[in-house]
Image (tube, coloured by chain):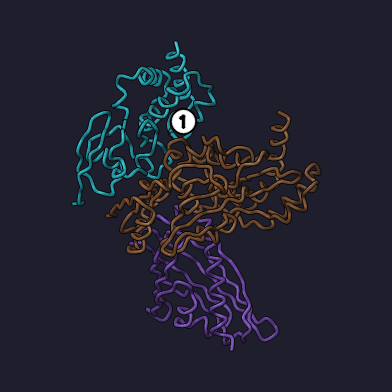
Amino acid sequence: MTEIYTPKSIQEAISFLAAHPDARPLAGGATLIAMRNAGLIEASHFVSLSEIGELQGIAKTGEGIRIGAMTRHRETAECDLLTGSLAVVRQAAGMIANRPVRNMGTMGGAVSNADPAADYLPALACVDAVVTLAGPDGQRDVPVRTFVQDWYETALDEGEIVIAITLPAPRNELSLYRKVARVTGDYATASCAIAMDGDTIRVAIGACGPGPIRDTEAEETLRGHLANPEAVTAFAGQLAALADPIDDVRGSAEYRLALIPRLIHAGLRQMKLAEVA
Amino acid sequence: MQIEGEFNVTAPQALVWENIRDPEIMAGCIPGCESIEQIDATSFRSVVAIKVGPISARFNLVVEITEEIAPETIRSRTKGEEGTRASILTSQNVLRLADDGSGGTDVAYAVDVTMTGRLGKYGLGIIRKKADQLAGVFVENFRKRVVP
Amino acid sequence: MTKKTLLTLTLNGEETDVATPMDATLLETLREDMGVLSVKRGCNQGVCGSCTVILDGEPVRSCLTLSARCKGHDLRTIEGYEADDIMASLKQHLTQSGGIQCGFCTSGVLLSAQTYLAENPHPTRDGVKSALSGNLCRCTGYRTIVDAVCDAAVEVAR
């Protein structure tokens, strides 16, 4: 039997987790309760984060747009603040699973779980988001691009929780999220978050390794050559070289690698159409 | 699922053979190995703990050596479970040693593993990556033990 | 015997005290402690949709919801839609179109469809398919379900 503790503040949550090493923080429950139901997780307590006001809501701040860890995917998918360069994050949110799951799952939970095939991480890596963590030693910021360290392993230390994800202020640019999956709402077989940055693109590939794949040097090399398909293919090749895809029911490693250039080319075409529109 | 690999040890084949057959040494090198116990001339019991993200599992394994051709080949099979038979694991294993021509030994392994139950259902693709990582750690540990 | 605690839940407009294990999912509490069998346990992983219930007007997975978190919230199952015109039309069309075979997915389908049509009185076929993407059916092949929802939409709009 797992007990449920519902703290009213971040501090209360952190203190409880520190005092109970077998307790687990509970965000939306879309993943943790599924694992519990499958018998994969046993916890002495679930520390429910649902009543902590500071973890709720999306707001403009001095740094940009701050998304509270308990923000449900539905809210992110409907958020008007996520325009232009940040539209990719809004789109990714809208492609997660289905409506009931989007009503339950949270960005903090998804980012903490760091499923390699989940949709947020490539979108957040594409926009250079920053994750704020809180723990017994206080708060700290970790860029999303270094947040995922290994398969299902993140920068979270024992007793730490994600409290917010901050995106830079939106710029008037095109961005989009594109995913290949077996059926609508499935985890990605491979996915691509692209943002137009003047005469180059920022690209993060998802579901092809432990975390999202970006190569800023390759992006610089591509600058000014977006209209050259061979340059784009070479760029895709550099990302594929950094990939470490698995073989699983959603696709083989080979298939995922083959999807990377196709996703990028298709994403660029989609952007061109949006430009003209 | 096939898990295969090879590595080189800068130690003579006879020494590598001796060490790789020694359960005490293997227990010290296999990451997560909590115990190895010899049951009879050809069988060992072992407990190995693995963690992937939030999921921890403790495997109770029995390894049976089915063929040994000194100092080159060991064939064995493994049967095991975790979580009181919540997952069942079986594997056929082959280990081959060869002199690398410059005083060292090339070691090649091939493991054909089947997992059913709660872990079998959940992301076997990640398990291969995890296995590759653990193999890497094993190789480091083995080299430290064996290379004089 | 699992230790139970007393929870006050508001189901289909009625407040009830329920004795249920503290860490029970809403699916377990509804079926085992409240006798609400319209909610089904399919995958228990949140994928199949047969456990769908409406929480504060939004569809959620009861198999992934902790009952302890539902105190003070408004819960609805299909039993709570007896007086709803959209639901009545959906039920009739689903029965007629061949969109019900074993019936296991039906409660979830009806709740997802009702929520969608209440917000989208003139849906496209693709919109219906997208709205039902979280409800799996092993019997019908989906076409007759989608037909029924589209037909119900036309009828309700009249």
Residue for point 74% across, 43% down: A198
Where does residue A55 sit, x and y in percent of width and height? 43, 48
Of residue B37 and residue A54, the one placed in the foreground of this image is A54
Instruction: Identify whether A40 is placed above or below B7.
Output: above
Instruction: Identify whether A209 is placed above or below C145.
Output: below
Where does residue A183 sit, x and y in percent of width and height? 54, 38
Q: Which chain is brown?
A: A
Q: Residue furthest front?
A: A62
Residue for point 24% across, 41% down: C32
Could you tell whether A240 is left or right of A53 in the image?
Answer: right
Of residue B51 and residue A128, the one placed in the foreground of this image is A128
Where does residue C47 sit, x and y in percent of width and height? 43, 41
Where does residue B97 sit, x and y in percent of width and height? 60, 78
Chain C tint in image? cyan
Residue, disc 1: C132
Question: Residue B60 sits in which quadrant?
Answer: bottom left
Chain under disc 1: C
Residue for point 28% across, 49% down: C23
Could you tell whether B46 is left or right of B72 in the image?
Answer: left
Of residue A252 and residue A200, the one placed in the foreground of this image is A200
Instruction: Identify whether A62 is placed above or below C125.
Output: below
Q: Amino acid at mark 1?
A: Leu
Chain B tint in image? purple
Question: Residue B90 sits in which quadrant?
Answer: bottom left
